[in-house]
Image (tube, rainbow, N blue to C red):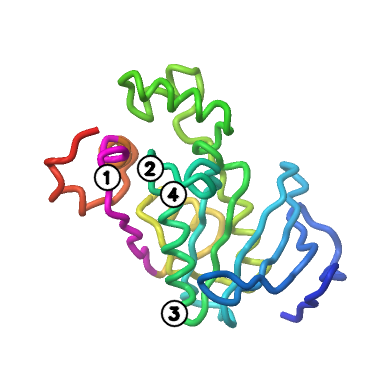
Amino acid sequence: MTEKIGVLGKKTSPRTDVERVVVTPLPTVYGEFRAYGYVDHERGDEQVALVYGELGAEGVLARLHSECLTGDAFGSRHCECGDQLAAAMRSVAAAGSGVVVYLRGHEGRGIGLLAKLRAMALQAEGLDTVEANLALGLPVDARDYGVAARILGDLGVRSVRLMSNNPRKREALVRHGIEVAEQVPLLIPPCESNITYLRTKRERLDHHLPHLDALAHLTS
């Protein structure tokens, strides 16, 4: 697939619900990526895929990363999101090629920033992350991965080696037509601030987090 890299970087193909509008080099501390900017016309979100190296069609190392302002930008220890994003970018750079799709509109598993902060306040009072969302009358997980699948398709990717501990993410990609050749663990050492959150993700959201078994001494 040809692409134009520059100020506009626009494709000449007709507009679809997810439209690529720009491609630009993006030097980072992890290496030289290319940022592909998209508009999701259905939801109104602006999305970005960070591509390293030349992508093939099969077995592409990929991370679908849900936007997390508190973790990604502020270094929150309430979750492991910021560390996972950094680890994913390091991994694709070390592998020589891969893609990190950064999914905006996924804040707080899809409930939004302020609702997430309210849920965090309830967790500080003793609720777990699932109970907190439900107490606010919100879904436990409202994320949709259709846009991620369409972005991967636009990049010519048909199957991925998915960096994720979440089996539901794998299932969602498969439903949307992207084969998952392998699920690659993305395990971050926990700390006292997030161990209860991580245990809840394992016990109630089915995340595969075997490294927690050796950390019974940690409490929230």
Q: Earlier in the sequence, mark 4 or mark 1?
A: 4
| For the residues bearing labels 2 and 1, Cβ distance under 8 angstroms | yes
**Which part of the image, by quadrant, shows the C terminus?**
top left
Q: Mark 4 is on which residue type?
A: Cys
Q: Which residue does the numbered mark 2 point to in the structure image? A: 77
Spatial distance from mark 2 to mark 1, Cα to Cα? 8 Å
- Give the x, y percent position of residue 189: 27, 54
Q: Which element carries disc 2, helix, strand or loop? A: loop
Residue at horizontal 38 percent and vertical 42 percent from the top: 77
| For the residues bearing labels 4 and 3, Cβ distance under 8 angstroms | no
Residue 197 position by quadrant = top left
Q: Earlier in the sequence, mark 2 or mark 3?
A: 2
Q: Which element carries disc 4, helix, strand or loop? A: helix
Q: Which residue does the numbered mark 3 point to in the structure image? A: 95
Q: Mark 2 is on which residue type?
A: Arg
- Give the x, y percent position of residue 135: 43, 17
- Majority secondary structure in the magenta region: loop
Q: Is residue 127 left or right of residue 173?
A: left
Q: Earlier in the sequence, mark 2 or mark 1?
A: 2
| 40 and 36: which is toward the camera | 36
Q: Which residue does the numbered mark 1 point to in the structure image? A: 191
Residue at horizontal 61 percent and vertical 73 percent from the top: 33
Q: Is residue 92 above or below residue 18?
A: below
Q: Which residue does the numbered mark 4 point to in the structure image? A: 81
Q: Mark 1 is on which residue type?
A: Cys
Residue 130 counted in the magenta span: no
| 48 and 188: which is toward the camera | 188
